[in-house]
Amino acid sequence: MNLHDFPRTCLGFFPTPVVELARLSKLLGGPKIFMKRDDLTGLAMGGNKTRKLEYLLGDALSQGCDAIITAGAAQSNHCRQTAAAAAKLGMECHLLLGGEAPERPSGNLLLDQIFGCHIHWTGEHRKGEDIPEIFEELLAAQKRPYIVPYGGSNEFGALAFAEAAHELEAQAKGRNFSHIVFASSSGGTQAGLMLGRKMLGKTYQVVGINIDKEEAGELPFNRQILSLANRAARLVGLEQEFSARELILNSDYLGGGYAVIGDLENEAIAMTARTEGVLLDPVYTGRAMGGLIQMIRSGEISRDARVLFWHTGGTPSLFAYANGLDLAWHTGEKLPPTAR
Ligand SMILES: *Cc1c(COP(=O)(O)O)cnc(C)c1O
């Protein structure tokens, strides 16, 4: 099947802009850097999940479903975009969030509540563990529930990013990108970009920056991403399997672990804000940009490269993590004089 033959619903504004980050590039003495602004997908403060949800909820609607269930962390950007999409489509939305309810909601969680979704706190349970129970309850209430996978990452979510690679190609205007760099977590973005690259016959490197450690007993991330890419490839009738060699998942920048903000993230957020007026988030895009900055400094990405940084969103979580930011970076004290 062709990418356009799958059910899809319209949730965002596409294409998202591609801009050049000339001042950041100059500050680093580095290669040309471009940015794909998926923080501007337009749904409820934007982000990469909007693309996936167009395919996932398109599938849900085509099956006649009227309620959505998904799971994530308390500050999940995926859950926030799902809550907004469900509101727009008039569907009931159930979010299963890890941990306990905080005294005062902020960031993504505040927005989840504004969108009127049902929040179920899952305490110590593993992500998604309580989904079957909610599913059964909704069935018993004569609803037709649809489960959106963690991070929106199944083969339909990946298709959205194969489509996004085509969108980028139409905007590239002969700029020959050498690397596409982005934050990778549940893997749909990376699997989709790998598929799009193959469909288009491009040679750029698709470089995912891993932002989270693997949990014991989980399938390793690289195996999950390859499996996703292969399943999505079969949907569009691509015969070749992806090999492990085609997958670049960089785990050098995990720092203190998921959502632990260190110098890497603080510096990347401060430098990008001060040179380009663009906001990154501390959990995903700040870590990925920090990784890119290190790869440029170390020469792993050379000065004659042409890098596209895919901004995957996450901006609302800046407010929720405000107390974790080291203000000395953001007031400029820790930045090099050229960046203040
Ligand atoms: C979900 C998310 C990612 C990771 O995308 P995956 O497809 O889950 O790998 C990156 N950045 C932000 C801001 C996200 O919300």
Image (cartoon, grey):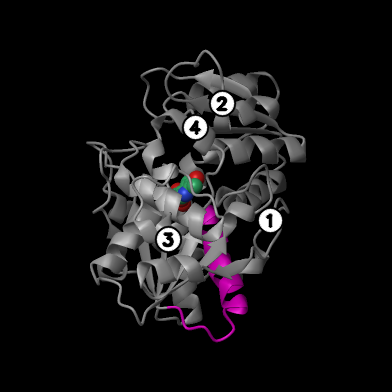
* Magenta residue span: 155-177
Task: State how many labels appear.
Answer: 4
Along the line of sight, which residue is nearer the eye, 69 or 63?
Answer: 69
Q: Is mark 1 within 8 Å of ligand 1?
A: no
Q: Is residue 230 shown to the viewer in this render? A: yes
Q: Is mark 3 on a helix, strand or loop?
A: helix
The residue at the point 36 percent across, 19 percent down is 124
Look at the image and say whether residue 173 sits in the magenta stretch: yes
Q: What residue type is labelled 1?
A: Arg
Q: Mark 2 points at which residue?
A: 106
Query: Which is nearer the N-term, disc 3 or disc 1?
Result: 1
Q: What element carries label 1?
A: loop
Q: Where is residue 145 in the image (x, y as percent from the top left)?
A: 63, 32
Q: What residue type is labelled 4?
A: Gln
Q: Does the residue labelled 3 lie within 8 Å of ligand 1?
A: yes
- Give the spatial CA distance, label 4 vs label 1: 26 Å
Along the line of sight, which residue is nearer the eye, 59 or 210?
Answer: 210
What numbered label is drawn on residue 75? 4
Q: Where is residue 8 in the image (x, y as percent from the top left)?
A: 68, 56
In the image, residue 249 sits, relative to residue 316, either above or below, namely below
Image quadrant assignment for residue 258: top left
- Give the spatial CA distance, label 2 vs label 4: 9 Å
Query: Which is nearer the N-term, disc 3 or disc 2?
Result: 2
For this view, does 230 lie left or right of residue 144?
left
